[in-house]
Image: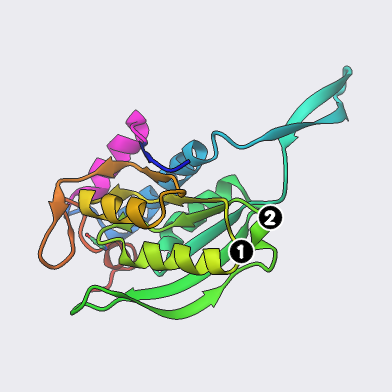
């Protein structure tokens, strides 16, 4: 069921290191995020069920594997989640998309919701929730709660970086939701940033401060 998978593929680790560097440009950061998200998507979808379909190749008929079940849902926690979304949609263009607007109150570090839109039949689909940073986990815990209230029960959580504190809190709140990340860093600082981390993912991808 739950548990944490660290995606230690060498390409993922190499790209992540460049993203962490403080001198990496906005354009470079965005390009790397798009590339790395396709690799993360590849890993998070590794266990998807297959069924078979009769097809004709130019040479013969064959019983060929295709994905089973309804289309996936990628649920992006705004705004930084959208950075992971694009690369994932490159790989799974037929996926449905949910948007969950949550911002982090910089004083309390609590998640405050301002937007929620998801496909109707979310209970029949695998939902992959995406947010680059699993820091305090307040936003991701709240996002998954929202999705469960709408009927989702087959959920995975994908991030780029996690803090041990965030992993612990998330797994305690949602032990049925497996977590996939490229790294579990050292700790959270007093402002709720992941250390060593990469800074504010939204600011780095959109060039804001
Ligand atoms: N969100 C970010 O963008 N960066 C962090 O380090 C923590 C939360």
Q: Can you tell which mark lies on residue 176?
A: none
Q: How many marks?
A: 2
The prevailing secondary structure element of the residues shown in magenta is: helix
Residue 203 image-quadrant placement: bottom left
Please say whether residue 69 is one of the residues in the magenta stretch: no
Residue at the left extreme, as displayed: 190
Residue drawn at the location 33% of the way across and 41% of the way down: 182
- Name the side, left or right, on which 143 lies relative to 149: left
Q: Is residue 42 above or below residue 206?
A: above
Residue 13 image-quadrant placement: top left
Of the numbered discs 1 and 2, the one sitting upstream in the chain is 2
At which x and y percent is residue 52?
79, 30
Q: Nearer the viewer, residue 171 or 192?
A: 171
Q: Which residue is mark 2?
A: 124
The local secondary structure at tag 2 comes to helix
Q: Look at the image and name its color scheme.
A: rainbow
At which x and y percent is residue 189?
11, 60
Magenta residues (range): 7-21
Q: Which residue is mark 1?
A: 151
């Amino acid at each position: 069921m739950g548990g944490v998978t660290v995606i230690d593929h060498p390409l993922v680790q190499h790209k992540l290191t460049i993203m962490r560097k403080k001198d990496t440009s906005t354009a470079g950061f965005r390009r790397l995020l798009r590339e790395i998200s396709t690799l993360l998507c590849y890993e998070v979808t590794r266990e998807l069920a297959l069924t078979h379909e009769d097809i004709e190749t130019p040479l013969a008929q064959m019983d060929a594997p295709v994905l089973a079940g309804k289309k996936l849902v990628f649920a992006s926690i705004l705004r930084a989640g959208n950075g992971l979304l694009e690369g994932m949609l490159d790989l799974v263009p037929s996926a449905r998309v949910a948007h969950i607007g949550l911002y982090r109150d910089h004083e309390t570090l609590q998640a405050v919701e301002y937007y929620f839109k998801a496909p109707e039949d979310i209970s029949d689909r695998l939902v992959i929730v995406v947010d680059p940073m699993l820091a305090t986990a307040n936003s991701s815990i709240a996002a998954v709660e929202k999705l469960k209230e709408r009927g989702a029960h087959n959920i995975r959580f994908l991030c780029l970086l996690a803090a041990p504190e965030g992993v612990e809190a998330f797994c305690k709140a949602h032990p049925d939701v497996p977590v996939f990340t490229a790294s579990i860093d050292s700790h959270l600082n007093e402002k709720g940033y992941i250390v060593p981390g990469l800074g504010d993912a939204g600011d780095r991808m959109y060039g804001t401060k």
